[in-house]
Structure formats: structure tokens, C-alpha cells
Amino acid sequence: MEVPGAGRDMKALETIRVAAQEEAQSISVNAGAAAAKEDEALFEREIRKTLLGRLKLVINVFVGIFCIAILFRSWHFLAPEAWAFLSEKQISLIDTILTSGFFVLLGGIAKDTIINVLPKKRG
């Protein structure tokens, strides 16, 4: 014996089941896309962290060389001539390196000031 309206209820249940499956599939796809974006962001952060570490190493090496150049120049300026171990040409080269290094440092500070500090004061 058939229950009146049972066929209609079964169709409604089937429609709800299909809609639920489509929704679950949509959520799954969206979750996969979100996970892919998160993985990409994590990868970019790791690359930036690695590059920043290498940049810091390069900067530290150049700062070390700069300090050694200052030390050598100071030694030849303050010590007696008998204790000098560099020629005038080598001392002149050290002076050139120190002067150019100073102006590069000054330019970097000026650039940083112009880019970061001045716009903040205007706003």
C-alpha cells in the first residue's frame, strides 16, 4: 500500500541530499584553495627569511671589512713610521674605500629617511 505524498517526500529528500553533497564538495574545494594559499604564503615567508639572513650576512661582512680598514688607517695615522706596514698607495686606497663607504652609508640613511620618516610626518 502506498502512502500519499511519499514520492514527493522522497524527491525532496533526494534534492536535499544532492544539495548537501554539492555544498560539502564546495567547502572541500574552498578549504583546499585556502590551504594552498596558506602554503604559498608560508613558502614566501621562508624565502624572505632566508634572503634576509643572507643579506644580514653580507652586511656584516662589509661592516667587518670597513672596521678593519678604519683600524689599519688609524694604526698608520697614530703609530710611528717605523711600525707602518702599508705603502702610501695602499693607505690611499684605504682612504678611498672609507670615503666611498661613508658616502654610501650616508646615502642609505638619507634614502631611508626620505622613504620612511618624511611621509609619516606629513600625515
Image (cartoon, rainbow, N blue to C red):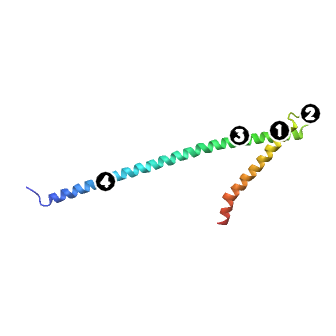
Q: CA distance from mark 2 to mark 4?
A: 89 Å
Of helix, strand and loop, which one carries label 4? helix
- x 83%, y 43%: residue: 95
What is the three-letter code of the residue carrying label 3? Val
What is the three-letter code of the residue carrying label 2? Ala
Q: CA distance from mark 4 to mark 3?
A: 58 Å
Check contact, mark 1 vs mark 4: CB within 8 A.
Answer: no
Identify residue for label 3. 61
Q: Position of residue 79 (x, y in %)?
A: 89, 37
- Between discs 3 and 1, the one toward the N terminus: 3
- Between discs 2 and 1, the one toward the N terminus: 1
- Between discs 2 and 3, the one toward the N terminus: 3
Identify residue for label 2. 82
**Residue at the left extreme, as displayed:** 1
**Which quarter shows the C terminus?**
bottom right
- x 48%, y 46%: residue: 39
Identify residue for label 4. 22
Of helix, strand and loop, which one carries label 2? helix
Identify residue for label 1. 72
- Between discs 2 and 4, the one toward the N terminus: 4
- x 81%, y 44%: residue: 96
Check contact, mark 3 vs mark 1: CB within 8 A.
Answer: no
Q: CA distance from mark 3 to mark 1?
A: 17 Å
